[in-house]
Image (cartoon, rainbow, N blue to C red):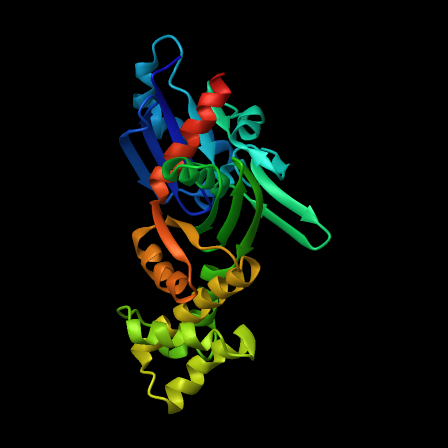
Amino acid sequence: MSERLIAIDWGTSNFRAFLVDRASGECLDSRRSEAGLRALSSAEFPHYCAAQIGDWREDGGVERVPVYLAGMVGSQRGWREAPQLDLPVAAADLAANVVPAPGLDNAWIVPGVKVVREDHVDVMRGEEIQAFGALARHGGDSALCCLPGTHSKWARLEGGRLLDFTTMMTGELYHAVRFHTLPGEPARASADFDAEAFAQGLKVAHHPGGLLHALFEARSRHLYAGLAAEQVGSFLSGVTIGSEVRAQRGMAPEASEVLLVGSTTLNGLYRRALEAEGFVPVEVDSDSATLAGVCALAERHGA
């Protein structure tokens, strides 16, 4: 068995590859690009991947260094469709259902997960690996994970299994409101983060009129309550993130600690929102969560 492995998180917009020491989980090298699914045709996936990581694979001796690919690369519009497993799932279930990536030897696409119930239908690709990795980094076998992003995910794990998750269109809604609506018009230009405006947004997210009213207050406050044009973006961020976190507080009223798995910028915003709702955020870097999750899967796949 190779002493190294390659973990790839390949989404709609970005490609991230990591050369990992299998024993320690240490990242030995990494490469990133904006060559996400939108930038490539299906026939280009094996060639692009091989070009990015080919030199890393020469250290594997007779058997090349194994590659594990997670994210939208396993969707219908990706390299090859991998199944989306019904919950609950453990890391061993993901390992048992990887599919070979056509055109690249010893390369495996990780399955996603899904919820299909009368009261809840949802899908996930890539974040399941990060959730298991965050749990491994933090220790223990149970956690509530928040994974911020364009489509934020909240995942509940118990006994080492992913039991449930919810997707929130927070990032996409923020972008749509800011760049394509009247309330967001003053925020078209870039502006520095404004903590006061963000805090206002968090409070307005509690308005009994709900999110649809709270978003419009960006317009009203800009006209009559002193919300400056350069503050509107931060206000809208507070409203959207605040609404997301508030909804999750309602779904998990007894929860305290939340594993916050994201980038430095988003983690800072979510920390404010989580603390405002009485959560205790524990930050886990998204890259380290991905590596830990892939290492856990690879160990079970090899077995």
As drawn, the residue found furthest toward the bottom would be: 224
x, y percent for residue 186: 36, 79
x, y percent for residue 100: 53, 23
x, y percent for residue 280: 38, 56
Residue 35 visible: yes
x, y percent for residue 293: 43, 33
Q: Residue, x 40% and y 85% (percent of image)?
A: 221
Q: Residue, x 50% and y 51% (percent of image)?
A: 153
Q: Is residue 246 above or below residue 3?
A: below
Q: Indicate left or right for 272 with 205 as reference.
A: left
- Location of the N terminus by quadrant is top left
Q: Residue, x 29% and y 71% (percent of image)?
A: 195
Residue 47 visible: no
Q: Is residue 105 above or below residue 43?
A: above
Q: Nearer the viewer, residue 205 or 108?
A: 205
Q: Residue, x 38% and y 74% (percent of image)?
A: 235
As drawn, the residue found furthest toward the top would be: 62
